[in-house]
Image: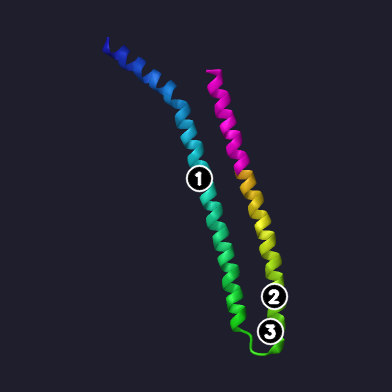
Amino acid sequence: MYTNIFQNFNEHSEKTFAPLLKFNQLVAKNFTDLTNLQLDAARQYADIGLSQLQAGTQVKDVQDLVSCGSKQLETMTRISQQMVEDGKKLAELTQEFKSGLETLAADAQKK
């Protein structure tokens, strides 16, 4: 008798909390992906900044200064490209999260 009560309670709990569990898993995955994206971007921008700092310490004459200036222009181009790539990655993550939410909402409406 009590076995059926507990079994029914477990089944009902699983049905009730399954959408919430899926939502939490989706949010956790999205948060992890966003954190990794931010850490990667911070690492890349820090590397660029440190390399520029190092390049600045190597300037000893006018020719080195001119060379350093042209390298800075190249670096600005690199940073611009990196920002575009990061924006695309962020847009992809946002789209994945939106699609996941839409799927969860559609599944919830079916039940």
- SS assignment for the magenta stretch, majority: helix
Q: Position of residue 94 (x, y in %)?
A: 60, 42
Q: Which mark is residue 96?
A: none
The three-letter code of the residue at mark 3 reads: Leu
Q: CA distance from mark 3 to mark 2?
A: 10 Å
Residue 91 is a magenta residue? no
Please report the residue visible at 60 percent of the width from the left and 36 percent of the height from the top.
98
Residue 80 position (above or below residue 70) = above
Residue at screen point 49% across, 33% down = 23
Q: Of residues 4 and 109, which is closer to you in this image?
A: 109
Pinpoint residue 105: horizontal percent, then vertical percent.
56, 26
Q: Is residue 106 magenta?
A: yes
Tag shown at residue 31: 1
The picture quadrant where one finds residue 21 is top left
| Kind of residue indicated by mark 1 | Phe
Which numbered disc, 1 or 2, marks the residue that appears first in the sequence?
1
Dot 1: element: helix
Residue 91 locus on image (x, y percent): 64, 46
* Residue in the picture at 69% in, 60% down: 81
Q: Secondary structure at mark 2?
A: helix
* Mark 1 crowd level (few <14, some 14–19, many ≥20, 10 Å Cα): some
Q: Which quarter of the figure is the N terminus placed in?
A: top left
On residue 65, the disc is 3
What coloring was used for the rendering?
A: rainbow
Report which residue position mark 2 lands on.
71
Relative vertical location of residue 81 with respect to residue 97 in this rendering, above or below? below
Residue type, mark 2 in image? Lys
Q: Nearer the viewer, residue 14 or 69?
A: 69
The magenta-colored residue range is 94-111
Describe the element under mark 3 as helix, strand or loop: helix
